[in-house]
Image (tube, rainbow, N blue to C red):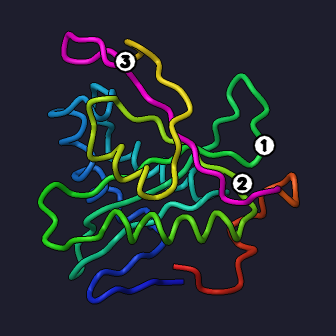
């Protein structure tokens, strides 16, 4: 299952992609408040992330001329509540990517995949100062659900966090998400 746009290819992540995913993610952790994590995970952490995410939900990468230039995955957010068919979005693009439209291509492929699997909505939490990410999500139909004042702390400062949501279907037809193996057609 692949989606190609010019030389950009969207495909499921493989464990072998972990090093490049780590390289994309690291600057967001070390140099920005857009990701509130403070420590870079080990290579085995990213390998495990790919394995666990793909066991039941999609984890996609964008590849350009043999190099991973972005990735997107979703995770369940059933903590504290029984949020059925709802997932949390994580999308990252390499800062030095030589091609435009990586984030949009990744999100489009992910949205198609999630809809086919029966997911009904996506949640994204964004640090309030990340205006580019907020514009991206609003452009893709996300609506502001809530703002949590001073909910994140990094680099010696408090940061407001905004939660955005997007419904994928008007009325859910099923209460269980299908396994990723159930897809029998190309959606990326």
Q: Position of residue 81 (x, y in %)?
A: 75, 27
* Crowding near the residue tagged with mark 3, few <14, some 14–19, many ≥20 C-alpha atoms within 10 Å: some
Q: Are marks 1 and 2 in contact (CB under 8 Å)?
A: yes
Residues drawn in magenta: 152-171
Residue under circle 1? 84
Q: Position of residue 91 (x, y in %)?
A: 39, 52
Residue under circle 2? 120
* Crowding near the residue tagged with mark 2, few <14, some 14–19, many ≥20 C-alpha atoms within 10 Å: many
Q: Earlier in the sequence, mark 1 or mark 2?
A: 1
Magenta highlight on residue 12 = no
Looking at the image, residue 139 sits to the left or right of residue 87; the answer is left
Q: Magenta segment, principal secondary structure?
A: strand
**Closest to the observer, 14 or 162:** 162
Residue 152: assigned label: 3
Secondary structure, mark 3, is: strand
Between the C-alphas of marks 1 and 2, the distance is 8 Å
Q: Residue at x 39, y 67 (%)?
A: 61
Looking at the image, residue 149 sits to the left or right of residue 155; the answer is right
Q: Position of residue 63 (x, y in %)?
A: 30, 75
Q: Earlier in the sequence, mark 2 or mark 3?
A: 2
Secondary structure, mark 1, is: loop
């Amino acid at each position: 299952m692949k989606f190609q746009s010019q030389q950009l290819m969207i495909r499921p992540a493989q464990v072998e992609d972990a090093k490049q995913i780590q390289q994309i993610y690291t600057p967001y952790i070390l140099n920005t408040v857009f990701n509130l994590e403070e420590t870079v995970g080990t290579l085995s952490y990213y390998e495990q992330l790919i394995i666990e995410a793909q066991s039941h939900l999609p984890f996609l990468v964008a590849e350009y001329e043999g190099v991973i230039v972005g990735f997107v995955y979703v995770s369940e957010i059933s903590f504290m509540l029984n949020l059925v068919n709802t997932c949390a979005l994580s999308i990252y693009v390499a800062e030095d990517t030589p091609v435009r439209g990586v984030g949009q291509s990744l999100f489009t492929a992910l949205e198609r995949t999630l809809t086919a699997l029966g997911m009904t909505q996506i949640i994204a939490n964004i640090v309030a100062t990340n205006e580019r990410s907020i514009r991206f999500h609003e452009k893709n139909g996300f609506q502001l659900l809530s703002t949590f004042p001073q909910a994140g702390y990094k680099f010696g400062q408090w940061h407001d966090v905004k939660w955005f949501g997007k419904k994928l279907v008007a009325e859910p037809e099923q209460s269980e998400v299908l396994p990723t193996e159930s897809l029998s057609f190309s959606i990326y």
